[in-house]
Image (tube, grey):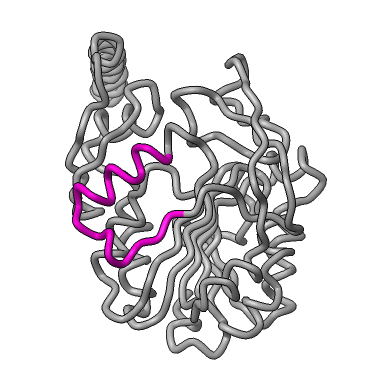
Amino acid sequence: MMPARKLVAHYMQKRDRVERAAIERIASMLVEDPVLRVNEFVGVFALSPQSHIFRRVAMAGHYEPELTARCRVLLDVDRDVMDIGANVGFHKVLLGGLLRKGRLLAVEPTHDALKRLRRNIIMNGVGDKVAVLEGVASDAPGQIEIKIVAGLEEYSTIGALEHPSVANAEIVTRTVEARTLDQLATEHGLDVGFIKVDVEGAEHLVFRGGQATLARCRPVVLSELSDTLLRKNGSSSQEVIKMFEVLGYVVSDPMRPNLKPGNVEFGDILCIPREHPLASAA
């Protein structure tokens, strides 16, 4: 007879397989974007039925609630926000709804994600606080090539598209406008208090182009970070972490605060200025 613990594990794995198969079947039958309520982001969102984000929300019933809670605590509602790699707008809706005097600049380069982003902003009534810019943030201005997987725009990048989740996917490229964080902050007159970055292995380029803004505005920064993807693009997680430490930031892993940041293959970093009242709790 199978021990109870193994029996439970076997049942859970079988249930997950059945649920995944059901979601895949539903996704293949959809003729238009599904609109899902995601409570931790206080909104409803049109998603690509092919996207892995749709599958994660459909399977779990939520999307990154722990990170969302940290954003709420660290957001200064009277200062401005930059969202680099905005995708379909989860953080735009949440943070835009919380802002009082602050504004939010969302930067996204892919056409399909932009369409859903703009739709989601309108559906959730935050258009008066959110501006959308088509393009990317990098270390220098100009025209730059971006790699895209249709329906899976969350993996788009200006670097090498090496994420294992799209290892065998068909990649298309297009040329987009690149600006630096420093340019964007100056041109839009932003007093940046919070920056969220999700650029699939090109984080070092974003932060190299934002050194003046980081030094002047001292924003809190939440960024995805993968040493695997960064090394494919000529950098490393430790290089990115060092950039912030040199500028006087406390860097931590928001999901695993007891671990050294940057040691998880696909994770996040939270960067808080040392003078921030919550830096000691990071």
Image quadrant assignment for residue 68: bottom left
* Residue 118 part of the magenta-drawn span: yes
Residue 1 visible, this orientation: no
Residue 266 as seen in the image, left or right of residue 101: right
Total number of numbered discs in the rendering = 0
Q: Position of residue 240 (x, y in %)?
A: 71, 61
Q: Residue at x 19, y 57 (%)?
A: 125
Image point 67% across, 51% down: which residue? 178
Q: Is 203 displayed left or right of 24 in the figure?
A: right
Query: Is 7 left or right of 268, judged from the image as shown?
Result: left
Identify the residue shown where x is 73% and y is 69%: 243
The residue stretch that appears in magenta? 114-132
The x, y position of residue 259, in whole percent, is 56, 59
In the orientation shown, which residue stands out farthest toward the right? 234
Q: Nearer the viewer, residue 14 or 97?
A: 97
Q: Residue 18's quadrant in the figure? A: top left
- Residue 192 visible in the current orientation: yes
Residue drawn at (17%, 41%), measured in percent from left and top?
37
Position of the N terminus by quadrant: top left
Between residues 53 and 145, which one lies in front from this camera angle? 145
Image position, residue 30 (x, y; %): 24, 15
Q: Is residue 245 above or below residue 118?
A: below
> Which quadrant of the view contains residue 46?
top left
Relative depth, front residue between 157 and 279: 157
Magenta stretch contains residue 208: no
Tell me where residue 118 appears, x and y as whole percent: 33, 46
